[in-house]
Image (spheres, helix red, strand yellow):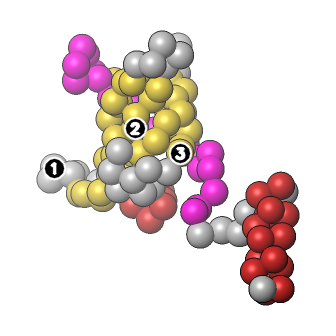
Amino acid sequence: MNVAVVTGNATNNAKAKKAKESDTQYAEFGLAVNHHRRETSFINIVAFGKQAEWAEKYVTKGRYYSVVGRLEGKGGRAKIIADSIDFQDFPRDEKPTGKKAAREKAEELRAKKK
């Protein structure tokens, strides 16, 4: 069984391309995966078809993703062929919730009183 599951930050925006031989669309991006010993692995991710379209549209540098797929290649040229790619964080422009939202609202009210 060949299943790879990784989570990490995208090192670049996904770039869509077309294979010369088959005209198949694919997208590539890098993922920085942190280990518990303060080490980081940089893994190449390749997605095909609908996953490639999704990746090109939504995978942006710095965002946190999880990828499930299969490991392909040997040695330093190994990559993960993605079966699924999911967000693991929220965009920076979304409104915060919980304690952070309460703290920001309190600061906003204090500023209005001055």
Q: Which of marks 1 and 3 is nearer the N terminus?
A: 1
Observer-side mark, 1 or 3, equals 3
Residue shown at 40%/38% (left/top)? 31
- In the image, residue 38 sits, relative to residue 54, either above or below, namely above
Q: What element carries label 3?
A: strand
* Residue annotated with mark 3: 64
Q: In which quarter of the image is residue 109?
A: bottom right
Dot label at residue 21: 1
Residue shown at 77%/71% (left/top)? 107
Residue closest to the eye, 48 or 92: 92
Dot label at residue 34: none
Q: What element carries label 2?
A: strand
Q: How far apart are marks 1 and 3 (CA)?
A: 33 Å
Residue segment shown in magenta:
73-92
Is label 3 in contact with label 2 (beta carbons under 8 Å)? Answer: no
Residue closest to the eye, 79 or 110: 110
Q: What element carries label 1?
A: loop
Q: Is residue 53 visible?
A: no
Badge 1: few (under 14), some or many (20 or more) residues near its Cα, within 10 Å?
Answer: few
Dot label at residue 31: 2
Q: How far apart are marks 3 and 2 (CA)?
A: 9 Å
